[in-house]
Amino acid sequence: MSPLRNLAVFGCIALSLAGCNDKKINVTIPMGAVLYAKLYHLGDPALGTVLPTEYRAGGAGKVDYDFSQVLAGGDCALGIPLEWNNSMKKHVAATATLSCDGVEQRELKGYVVDKDGKEGLDGVALGGVVSFVVTESVSVK
């Protein structure tokens, strides 16, 4: 092969590899899992970066499930439309939207909990961490 042709082949290979995404996400978020998001925007919805955590499946022989590390590594964000509940005197949510680089947005059903695991939040602040409990399993691809 001529040097020019070698360079052309090498260039094509380099360009094709540049388009590869080794952070491809393919996980299932199980029912009962808790996603933690550090808030960077207070609005409708409140937006936060997904933090890496561990989920332990219930029952005998608990198993670590590291989906949140994959989500955190995939630059995922959680949008939570918080509403004020007058009877509870807390912020509540019934859904959240998960968005990650290179993946379609996914709506998650669930609710927010405070540090004691009770539904609802007394208050929210920039830089604060919000816990969202997922009530239906969902696949993120």
Image: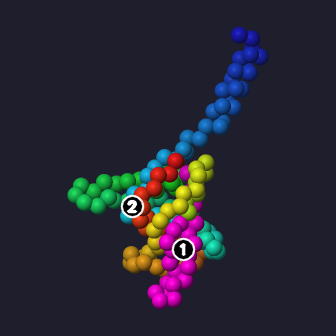
Q: Can the viewer see residue 123 in this picture?
A: no
- Choose the circle earlier in sequence order: 2 or 1: 2
- Left or right for 101, reference 131: right
Where residue 114 sits, quadrant-wise, is bottom left
- Residue 37 lies, with reference to residue 99, above or below; the image says below
- The Cα atoms of the two marked residues, 2 and 1, are separated by 24 Å
Where residue 8 sits, quadrant-wise, is top right
Pick out the residue farthest to the left: 60
Q: Which residue is mark 2?
A: 31
Tell us which disc is closer to us: 2 or 1: 2
Disc 2 packing (10 Å; few <14; some 14–19; many ≥20) = some
Q: Which residue is mark 1?
A: 128
Residue type at numbered disc 1? Gly
Instruction: Write down the region rendered in magenta.
Output: 74-96
Q: Can the viewer see residue 1 in this picture?
A: yes
Per the image, label 2 sits on a secondary structure element best described as: loop
- Residue 106 lies, with reference to residue 123, above or below; the image says above
- Left or right for 87, reference 18: left
Residue type at numbered disc 2? Met
Q: Position of residue 56 (x, y in %)?
A: 34, 59
